[in-house]
Amino acid sequence: MGITSRMIPTEDASARKREIEEKLKQEQETLSFIRENLEKSDQLTKGMVSILSSFESRLMQLENSIIPVHKQTENLQRLQENVDKTLSCLDHVISYYHVAKDTDRIIREGPSGRLDEYLACIARIQKAVEYFQDNNPDSPELNTVKARFEKGKELLEAEFRSLLTRYSKPVPPILILDAISVDEDIELQEEVVLEHLPEAVLQDIICISGWLVEYGRNQDFMNVYFQIRSSQLDRSIKGLKEHFRKNSASSGILYSPAVQTKRKDTPTKKAPKRPGYDNDLRVKLHSEALNEKHGATAGKDDVLDIEIDSYIHCISAFVKLAQSEYALLTEIIPEHHQKKTFDSLIQEALDNLMLEGDNIVSAARRAIMRHDYSAVLTIFPILRHLKMNKSEFDSTLQGTAASTKNKLPTLITSMETIGAKALEEFADSIKNDPDKEYNMPKDGTVHELTSNAILFLQQLLDFHETAGAMLASQVLGDTYNIPLDPRETSSASSSTSDFNKRLLSSYICKVLGNLQLNLLSKSKVYEDSALSAIFLHNNYNYILKSLEKSELIQLVTVTQRKAESSYRELIKQQIDIYQRSWLKVLEHLTDKNMPIFQPGAKLKDKERQVIKDKFKGFNDGLEELCKIQKGWAIPDKEQRDYIRQSQRKIVSDAYRAFVQRCANISFTKNPEKYHKYRPEEVEEMIEKLFDTSA
């Protein structure tokens, strides 16, 4: 290998050397070129630096020249702005001095018909007042704009009063009746809206009210509001009352045209239910019997009925109108004054209603002093209606003064007290009614006391819940010996209702018991025990039938389950006592003292006389009893037929047997003189008992 290297030709080394030298030369040339370029670049850089330095110098000179000019211009602009602002402020201040003059005409003419423009003027005056107060409180201009502001406020208050006075009208009675009427037959009945003020007027009033509250700082307008609206509320109720009096007498029930137009197209429709009334109840406060007893006339009864009916409607109307007034008031009066203003607004109408209620209570009290206990019935429909509507009444008066909220409960308490007093005194009057001979029915029929007592209880039945609550309110449980079950003292309405029902049942039983005792006492006025028995029979039977025909029997059996059977037993006892009156006739037909004889044997004179006496005694007794008892009365046909048939069978059977025993006995030459009546004739005579027309 080393030998091969040494054998490389010399020519290749020379070529290699030349190649290297050639490359070196090229590199030296390149280096020389770079150096030349660097020198040129340095020269250019020095030239640029020189130019920039010159430019910087010139900029500094320019800046030193421009900045003072700019600052001077800026100062001039600021001065211009200050001048403009000053001029604007001067114009603004000067305008305050012209406010009184500029607004004089509008203020003098008042806000009527241009409330927005008027309030804008008031706002300008108010700003002027604030300016002078803050900047020149001693200036005469302040007094001028103040006076103008007060004048403007006075005219706004006057406009508030004027709008309310001009557009506040009583609600028409027909519209009130529509609002308080309830009729299940009306499909999709719409609630009647009571619009007290036109919408545009209402918005003006609301606007004025808002300004007076915010800027006027005056609450006098609230007094104006409640005084005007209070008067309209009272007039609305009085208008309804007057409308009711004019129309109720002729039509009986007030119909509302607005309601009628919504009815189905059927020819027979019931009148709208009146507030608080049962569908089939037309309140009648006095019966003909009670009127006759106390000297009342039908005309007076109708007038009283209308008055009570009217009062009930007015109570419902007050609630509805008061609710409507409160809704209106909330739009006009500030929230924190609404309850107080509403309280003042309703006082006049509420006081008049309560006064009328007190007058009704006083009239009932005077009637009770005259022992006209039927007057309690004037209290019941009103009391029932008041209690039915008490929750809505309380809700309407929520937030008013305690004295206002207590007015209705006070009236209810007064009515319950006088009503309970009347009920109690009525029960005592039944017990203590005097036994006057001239007042007793000659024919032994039903006594007036009985018919009046039953009629009173039947009318009481229409208001059984009210009557029970009335008795319970006076804590009469001990009087009627009603055991107090702890469950019945709970707040559950069903327990309370059950207790009141038991209390009323016990009261009715007390009245019936007093009536029974009095009737028993009265029956002793009759000298004839049979007539006394007929009298008691008629009265007991009348009581029982009256109880059975009405729901009174259900009330009575709440506390006396055997009341019905007890009356039936009393009736049977009196029939038995009556039948004993025939014993003196029937004793002539018995075998007592009857002679014993053989068929065909001749009787002695004494024996013949005994038979003659028996026939004569029977004939005379029969004729006398039939003559007397024909004038007696048993109004109940069923009872009359039963007693006749029973007596006919007893007498007829005994007479037939007696006649048959004497058929083959020759006791007289003139048998027709003693055997005056055939059995059929006797039966016919008995059939004519208790028949004054026979």
Image (cartoon, grey):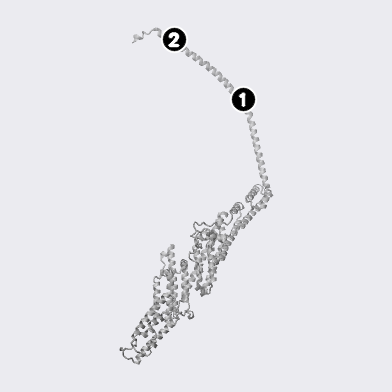
Q: Residue furthest left?
A: 598
Q: Residue furthest top?
A: 10
Tag 2: amino acid: Arg
Residue 622 sits in quarter: bottom left
How many neighbours does mark 1 have within 10 angstroms: few (below 14), some (14-19), or many (20 or more)?
A: few
Nearer-the-camera pick, 534 or 682: 682
In this picture, residue 68 sits left or right of residue 524:
right
Tag 1: amino acid: Arg
Tell me the quadrant of the picture where the N terminus can be found. Answer: top left
Secondary structure under the numbered disc 1 in the rendered image:
helix
Q: What residue do we see at 60% from left, 24% from top?
A: 55
Q: Is residue 288 above or below residue 329?
A: below
Residue 379: horizontal and vertical position, in percent?
51, 68
Q: Name the N-terminal-most of marks 2 and 1.
A: 2
Residue 564: horizontal and vertical position, in percent?
40, 72
Q: Which residue is mark 2?
A: 18
Secondary structure under the numbered disc 2 in the rendered image:
helix
Residue 657 sits in quarter: bottom left
Instruction: Identify the disc placed on residue 58.
Output: 1
Q: Is residue 471 above or below residue 169?
A: below
Nearer-the-camera pick, 339 or 356: 356
Is there any visible trace of residue 174 in the rendered image?
yes
Residue 89: horizontal and vertical position, in percent?
66, 43
Q: Is residue 656 above or below residue 282?
A: below
How many neighbours does mark 2 have within 10 angstroms: few (below 14), some (14-19), or many (20 or more)?
A: few
